[in-house]
Amino acid sequence: MTEQLRIANKYAFLRIKAKSYLMLVAVCFTLSACTEDPKNENETPGTSTPNGFFGNMPSSDAFSPVQRGYAVELPRDHKSHPKFQLEWWYLTFVLSAEDGQEFGLQYTLFRFNTGADETPRAKANAENSAENGYEGSAEDNLNSNDTASNQIARNWSNSQQWMGHASLHTAEHHYFEERFAGGAVGNAYVEQKPFTTVIDDWVWKAVTKAETTAPANSRAMFPSLLTVSFGKSSTHEAVQSSGKGFASSAASLSELNETMGSHAIEVSLNLDTSGPFIKQGNNGYSKKTEDERLRSYYYSQPFINAEGTLNIEGNSIQVKGKGWFDHEWTSHLANSEAMGWDWFSLHLDDGSKLMAFRMHAINKNIKNSTNKHSEIFTTASHIAENGTKETIEQANVSITPTAYETINEGESLRSVPTAWRIQIPGKDIDVSISPFKKNQWNNSLFPYYEGRVEIKGSHSGSGFMELTGY
Amino acid sequence: MLRTLLLTLNSLLAMAKFRLWEPLLIMAAIILANAGLVTVLLINEGATQGELLQSKKGLTSGSIIAPANSRARFTQSAYATLRRHGFTQLIAFSEREVTLSCRGSKPTTISLTLLGVDTQPLIGSAFRTKDFEAPAINDSAFSLSFLSRNARKYNEIENQQTPARRVLHSNSGVDFAVNGFIHPLTNAKLTCHDTLNETDNKSANFPSWPATVSAHVSNFAPQNTILISVDDFYRGGITLNSEEPAAPAKSDNTRRAQTQQKTYVPLSGLIALSPLSQQRLTQIETLLGIPVKQTTNNTDNDTGSLPDSFRLNLWAMSGLMGVVALFIVLNALNLMYRTRLPNIIRLRQLGISKRILSGALFIELLAYCVISIPIGMFIGFQAASWLSPVINGTFTSLFNAVFVNPDVNLLFTFGFALTTTFISLVVFSLVSIIKLSNALAVTPVKKENVMGQSAVGLISLCALLLLFLAETFVASTASALSFVALLLLTSCALVLLWLPILSSLLTKFVPRQWPVFHYVIANMHLLSSKTRLAVCAFFIALTANIGMNTMTDSFRDATEQWLTQRLYAPFYLYTDAPLSTIESLFAKSLPPFELTPLLKADATVLGVNSPETTQKVPSLASNYVSISSYPVHPSGRSALVLDSVLNNDINAVWREFKEGNGVFINQQLAFALNAKLGQVLDIKNVRLRKIVNSNDAAVSTSNSLEEITPNSSHGSKSNGLNSNIFSAQPQWKLLGIYPDYGNLNGQILVPLPSFNRHHTPIRNQLFSGVVAIYPEPSGETAAPDSHRHTIYEKDILEQHLKNQLGEHSEIALYTRQALLDTSMQTFDRTFVLTDGLNITTLLVAGIAFAVSLTVLTIGSAAQLSVLRALGVSQFKVKASLFAQYLLLCFISALLAIPFGVYLAYIFIQQVNRHAFNWVYPLSLNAPVILSSVGLSLLIVSMVLLLPLGKLKPKIDLRQEVQL
């Protein structure tokens, strides 16, 4: 009993520790801004809030803007673009084992520019918005010195903030882990030669095969090797309980301790491609609203063939499947106008690929308080088997939710549209999208839906769906 | 309807005004009860909060990985390498000293550790387990905006006294904002401190770290630190690398940075939230190419069940107080309604319904509550804040625990107090009303059911037997306290049974020549049945009083005797200097003295083994124990106090101890393990101690830790250290059990020679900072005049030591007597609380008596007027009444003595045993008991004089309503 108490105490300590550390994240104003999001959703579960998925990071002149004339060039643009506010390298896989087990795997590396180095204004704004709704004279004192504060040398990290997500869906379980790292510390970066993304021990690194002609210092992204180990053992999920009894606390502590050293999931995938990179939109310039005020640079690699092993809680499974890579960078998507989006990456059975995208944005020019989704912008890219891409304009594509799922993860009930119908008459596409399984929710700092989907209708196949802002 | 109610209420209040002291009495009781309640509530809250604070000792209490070589340092890239290789549970941290001062006034600087921790990994989901995910998000952990809002909210609701955040400015016009955390206790230490300075004042104008720290009060930061992000830590002139960092991203800033002074602060180490295995450590060494060491600090100051038992004790006391207060209220209500009865009857005759009447009565009661509860609460708050330094002293000195000035929700407390008080008042008023209504009804006179003396005797015998039987079932603090309650109730019942018998016996002995006195005694016999409540209150108060006083007194005796014997040397030196320094110093320059250092180590006891049966007695948990050295020279022997020794042969036992064939353990450990003499302890994980809880020592620890040589530092979890700590491994056979008052943890005494004698760093690590200094054995013969001698020499010795050591280390030299005095003073201060409660309970009991006297005199007014008519003077009537009550008190006091002693025995043998794991001999001290009795009688007689003075043994027949 005493031991239990001791553990419970220690656990409570850890909990406070973790909690308070989370508070300390204020270092990164990006993140602090985002917390408004879950809180507001508390009040109105199931609906989007006026704050965007990435919270309310203000757009600022300090960050490089996305410009129409710029042409994305590869492999040059595989690199990190630190002057842009937001960037991600996004891998999703639809995998299957020989025995017929199906998996959905996601690995994403996000980069944020917290603006602390760039301009005083950006930071001051960020801080002000973080402090939104809280009037305090002490704050004012603090902020008044911001101009100066940015000229003080930073000797530990720079203004870059890295965030990694890894998620695996098996038929029964969901394993997810989220990691953070400061820039310039050395444990998170994207390198060009050879192409490497790193956050702690999650590494995606280009490899040179003997038969490939690429020189060793190639900037090529593929072929490459993805090694990620993450997640807590699912057996411990049974421990989850609403009560805070000693037993469950102690169990959680041991859970925490265990996951510190070893992970439930070890992924090792060899990636290669069978088609070209696809520059989305106009040569990589991708508009997210009709008036292009929300926009990004965006290219994809939908023709990834993945092969390797998944080690799930000690069981090594040989898997094979298709992957989809997205690289997107922007300074225009992190503000409160971008409330969220629905994104689909679909591998159709005829060998073609489909990217479908639906943006919810607030248009400040439209004063319509009753409808929070005041503007919805739809776009799609159809990529033929041979790699020719066609951008489908808003008028020619319809993406409509057909069923909602109530997701009770984290702190609130959310109603999330997880079944969809996508129609592109010009391409004879009329498919219904249904989730691979229920509850594919990534309960991360910015919580969102990310999961494998199955396709039925005019075409069949599988793919991934991302739903943010719910 | 409402008007009737108002009118009724008015008339009731008018009656209250006419006999003001009755409502006043009720209010006094309410005030008293609430003051007690609030005090206890606050003190408990403080203990709880202190306990909470302590259970979370901050980050650095985990295990810490640092380079084994004190000169080697981890670099940022080494940290990144480790993280990239999967050591994601490691978190880099860095620390340096800063001083805080008040703007304007110089001398109040406080030095704190600025602790920079890599906060980034901690945001990750691995640190959010399922169980705390939801609350973490609800409480909203991520953001500063949220934090500050919450902090403010928290501040408003719970924390009226201290600001939940403190802003510290650096002495610079140009600075940057930093968010941090500060421990509440540390925050409490700071007063006007708002300026942050570097420890060296050279760079006052161009501080290398020009930050404005906004430190939020959070009990998660370690004490005496300001916890910030490592990112903020390394800003300005604080650099991680000794040479100028040439990171391209900072090129704009380097120009500016050059104007600032550069301060090179290396990483202090890596925090591992859970200790790493040896295999993982080896992996780290391979990765980094340098040997590393892990320092595990799992001695996290186990306050044990102390705050629990403390709380329990307090609740018991407040419960007692509450009961006594209710006695008063009951009495006062009785009295009030009795005196109002004629008027109430008139009101009824006027046609006011029962409902309205009772409604008005309740409203009146509510009004009393509303008036007196805030007063009571105020007194409670005052008492708590007055007591908190005392309790704080107790906590730190006796139990090594923390007590914080509590923060309590005022509104909640008020609501709670109001509801409880009002409900109990309503219940009690109903009791009185029903009693009176019964009195109004005509009932035929019943033959009084008197129990025979033999029946009473039989019942008493059975009750006592049951009580003794129940005592054997006591197994925990809670059950011990329940037993105390049972004891009090049983004894109370017994007294009620015996009081009439004793008084009627007394009647027989009083000669009839003194008619008034005879009447007094005879009437007392009648009285005894009518004053039950008051007698009960008085009896309980007195029994508790005697019990507490006897316990305290026994404890004091035991402690004093124990201390006197244990402190054998004339001087004790407390220092943070390394032992080797002191030893060489004494060897060189102070020849006439001999030193006995106190060495300490930590260990874990898994259980005890009996030598015959190898069966292991399972202990509840692996117990943390401290191992202390004990000198084997003759004065050590004479200083050793043992409760019990093996085979009762002290000489043999001492010989074995001297030869390292066994150890002594303290009572606490013996109780915890249920160990018997001759058994063998199963000791694991003997390790060097990490000094906890002493502010001064904390600094010295971190320095001296680095001096551990590499061979001792590998894997402190393994048994590898055993061989280093002991030169000869002692046998863990139990030779004796010694008392160790004031210690909550188990302790083992090991002969001093068993400890490592040759390895200086280890010895320095083992050294607890206390050295006994005494003259060379030859001086012992000259013992008689040594006292004068020591007083004389103390100053010289101290001066000498200061000269030699003073520059680098703190020293404090105490004479034996000074140490003894300090200890006893601390002890006495600790029990101030008890005295206060004693007097309060007695006072309450006295009031109960006074009230019941008034009620009775109203009833017996007719008889008294007969006495007056018979020619007995008014003074005589009053004196006889006074004598009557005093006699009643005296008899109950006599009965209270044995029960009080029994209670003291229970306190020592059961409550103390279970709450603190120590017992001590019960010492019966007649003056203590007599003074308790005397004091209580004095208080009662003082209180009785009040109503007696007002008593008019005449009746106005016009006012008399025949009841």
Image (cartoon, coloured by chain):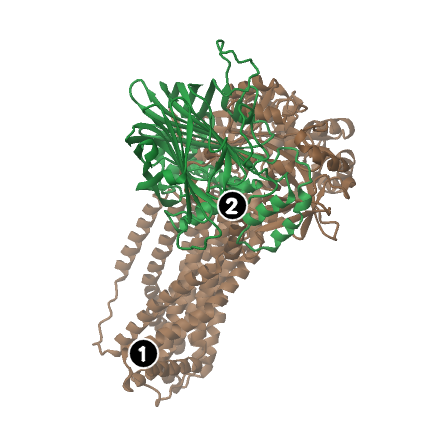
Chain colours: A green, B brown
Tell me the crowding category of disc 2: few under 14, some 14 to 19, or many 20 or more residues within 10 angstroms, Cα based: many
Direction left: furthest residue: B444
Q: Nearer the viewer, residue B378 or B614?
A: B378
Residue B791 pos. (x, y %): 73, 42
Query: How many numbered circles are shown?
Result: 2
Which mark, residue B723? none
Apparent side of residue A66 relative to residue B424 in the rendered image (left or right): right
A359 and B362: which is toward the camera: A359
Helix, strand or loop status at disc 1? helix
Of the pair B220 and A448, the residue shown nearer to us: A448
Residue type at the position of mark 1: Leu
Q: Position of residue B270 (x, y in %)?
A: 58, 29
Badge 2 element = loop
Image location (x, y in percent) of residue B931? 51, 59
CA separation in Å, label 1 and label 2:
64 Å
> In the current view of this chain or complex, which residue is farthest to the front?
A426
- Label 1 vs label 2, nearer the camera: 2
User: What residue would you read off at disc 2?
Assistant: A56
Q: Which mark is residue B357?
A: 1
Confirm whether residue A225 shows in the render.
yes
The numbered mark 1 sits on a residue in which chain? B
In the rendered image, which quarter contains the C terminus of chain B? bottom left
**Does residue B860 appear in this view?**
no
Determine whether B516 is above or below B379 in the image.
below
* Amino acid on which disc 2 is placed: Asn
- Badge 1: few (under 14), some or many (20 or more) residues near its Cα, within 10 Å? some
Q: Is residue B52 above or below residue A234?
A: below
Mark 2 belongs to chain: A
Q: Residue furthest top?
A: A211
Give how far across and how far down residue B778 sits, in percent.
72, 30
